[in-house]
Amino acid sequence: MQEFGIGLLGFGTVGAGVADGLIRNGDLIAERTGLRPVLRGIADLDIATDRGVAVPRELLTTDAQSVIDDDAVDIIVELVGGTGIAKTFTEAALRRGKPVVTANKALLAKHGAELTALAREHGAEIYFEASVGGGIPVIRALREGLVSNRIDWIYGILNGTCNYVLTRMEKEHLSFEEVLADAQRLGFAEADPALDVDGHDTAHKAVLLASLAYGFNVPLDDVPVSGIRGLATEDITHARELGYAIKLLAVIRRAGEHVEVSVHPALLPQEHILAQVGGVFNAVMAHGDMTEETLYYGKGAGREPTASAVLADICDVTKNLQSGSPRQFVGPGHSNAALSLADASEISTRHYIRLSLLDRPNVLAEISATLGTQDISIASVVQKETESNDHVSVVLVTHHATNRQCQAALAAIAAMDAVRDEPVHIRIEDV
Amino acid sequence: MQEFGIGLLGFGTVGAGVADGLIRNGDLIAERTGLRPVLRGIADLDIATDRGVAVPRELLTTDAQSVIDDDAVDIIVELVGGTGIAKTFTEAALRRGKPVVTANKALLAKHGAELTALAREHGAEIYFEASVGGGIPVIRALREGLVSNRIDWIYGILNGTCNYVLTRMEKEHLSFEEVLADAQRLGFAEADPALDVDGHDTAHKAVLLASLAYGFNVPLDDVPVSGIRGLATEDITHARELGYAIKLLAVIRRAGEHVEVSVHPALLPQEHILAQVGGVFNAVMAHGDMTEETLYYGKGAGREPTASAVLADICDVTKNLQSGSPRQFVGPGHSNAALSLADASEISTRHYIRLSLLDRPNVLAEISATLGTQDISIASVVQKETESNDHVSVVLVTHHATNRQCQAALAAIAAMDAVRDEPVHIRIEDV
């Protein structure tokens, strides 16, 4: 059986999972694909720590370049992470014409177009199933399964930490800070949770999905991102009473020649299947012009699920290498010059607004009038239990209005004497 | 750009959808894949009816063999359906070494191993994404996305008609007959609904999924199948009160060297995401040893979703033909001699049982004792509102017991004087 040499760069959690998968399920892979991927080198700065995987000692090295240069290594698996040395290694591998399999969403979101161009120049290719949705084969679903579809929109729950925090805030009526601290203790959140809870990890993945679906180079820095830090439990509770769940969503949606790409907490109708995605699970819902809604759901992170995605890519590469055709269907950075990022301020949705108001006559009439100056009409109002002697909490649901209209109205409302605290504003996504 | 000739056999609903997709999204496909599939022939017995698709008149013929034989046709798309002439056409195409793309689950469930062997013999291949789950790319998720995973189990909601009927029975408290009649009027059910509601369509798909996941030739005739005909609305209501939804499930589950493959209505915990799959939607949940649960959801039938899956396969074939490597990863009938179908009577689950009992002392004690003779213990009992002067409806939930134990106990119970009507018995699946 034809063998293909695998060079692993990075022997941390996922790297050890990949090595373990190759050892444990290597015969199964060979039986299914007719080809055998074989570990030929593993590079990490730390080769002393026992990773609990029985790899031959002589495969380990601290010299990544030697693995990249090894003629017995056909495929480079980059699991170093980050956009520094990982980029250098990836470029070095591509320049040698070696296909690269990566789980590095940050690298691809920032430098995908450049790296894809380099790969093409040298007859190589980048595979990145593991970079979005962990063990869920969503990249190949979009790339191959929906290849004949114009993609109308994609909604994604792409960060397990955020979804875990939101699920527990809703079910246990705990504060963001309480759940986060517990999640850190349990290992579901990083010591520095910013990349996750502030939405950046989701944004990286959104950029990859949007690039794949629409074939243009989505500029990460122009994607509006807001995370779940500071989200109040009472808004989750109010949303629930109104029939909604709050999820951190990646929204990717085409309108004419523009594509909205954004990351924000949003109210989703409770009966919608995306609202049912709980805990650390991820899900991507993609709407094609032929398929209509399709959904892909599973564990979005973790050693084994992510390693499964890396191994799926490795198998694809071995098949492509065998047939001498390393090319995949379209990837990120593929040029579709006609499309560009939509202006986020012109996106129109319904809005959830919570205000803390002085409990005096006519305040609601003033609020309504101020919204009216921006052509925003109110669909429903609920006055919640009194917060204090003189203030009441009021929850408004508006009809459709753009972000620009909503922000302008809220700025005016925030400046009113009768309004205490910054107004809370969350978009409602009518999927 | 390299062109590949497509020969379409069958120009009904899906065939017209495929032709329409090729015309409408042909440029998109070419842009994404770098290859162009081109319609070169369409065969149907009826070439007079206007299908609403602008195909050149000269492509139409009533002679399928001429399309198969046409040297300009590289790929045969079989959408004739059934296991008669469709088999003859498929064999003829494979014998000429032409890859066949098909949506024909009945043909593959019955003759998959034989056709796969024929394909291999002639250097051809069969592609069947469209045969399970319509527009959901679930076949390639299993075949490629989970290629490195041992599959522990698969649960599938695979028939949109059944799921539509069950959803409306639950939501609107209507009888099976009422909803079925309405579904037929609305076009969601066939005039002869047996293939759908009696579970055979689901069984065909279950056989394909099981063959793919476990690599052995699953004998369709040995798969226990029960459908939703005769399911009482009151059992759906009782199940709901107990925290369950009733779904028609394909269950595929490995235990040692045996694989359970069965189709039956089952109680699923309401909060489980599979229980949330409503209306005509399909979903497949597959548990891999590395990924854990993954779920694939979407429209399981209809012209456009099915055509999308056919087109995805066509694109795969063009890529494989270009690289001279028509082989896919494992397909049905792939021999794994070590595995065989499990004995359905030895499958152990919890059970939902409804009895109509004479309202007299000690009856419940007798029932409990009879269940006890088969080592079945009762987890909960609910006595429902009185049905008549002298009978009460009693719902039991048992602890784990095999089907054999349960059937034996129910036979004894049915013979008791105090029991009116045939006992109702539905499995509970603790996914």
Image: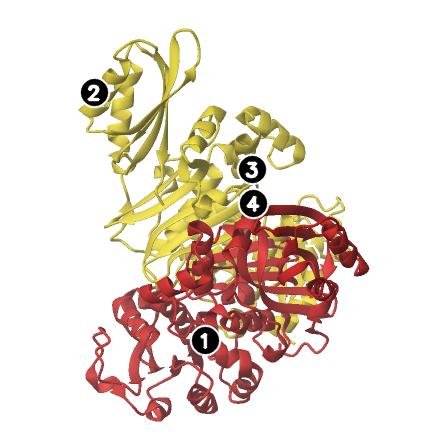
Chain colours: A yellow, B red
Direction from residue B97 to residue B51 in the image, left or right: left
Direction from residue B62 to residue B301 in the image, left or right: right
Residue for badge 1: B320
- Same chain for marks 3 and 1? no
Q: Chain of mark 4?
A: B
Q: Chain of mark 2?
A: A
The answer to whether mark 2 and mark 1 are in CB contact below 8 A is: no
Residue shown at the point (69%, 46%) measured from the top left: B380
Residue A79 location (% of width, % of height) = 59, 49
Q: Is residue A130 visible?
A: no
Q: Amino acid at mark 2?
A: Ala
Q: Chain of mark 1?
A: B
Q: Amino acid at mark 3?
A: Tyr
Residue shown at the point (24%, 76%) measured from the top left: B51
Q: Residues within 10 Å of mark 3 (few under 14, many from 20)?
A: many
Whole-angstrom CA distance, mark 2 to mark 1, is 63 Å
Q: Which mark is residue B241?
A: 4
- Of badges 2 and 3, the one in the foreground is 2
Q: Is residue B246 above or below residue A378?
A: below
- Of badges 3 and 1, the one in the foreground is 3
Q: Residues within 10 Å of mark 1 (few under 14, many from 20)?
A: some
Whole-angstrom CA distance, mark 4 to mark 2, is 46 Å
Q: Secondary structure at mark 3?
A: helix
Residue for badge 3: A164
Q: Nearer the viewer, residue B6 or A14?
A: B6
Q: Amino acid at mark 1?
A: Asn
Q: Nearer the viewer, residue A81 or A94?
A: A81
Q: Which mark is residue A369?
A: 2
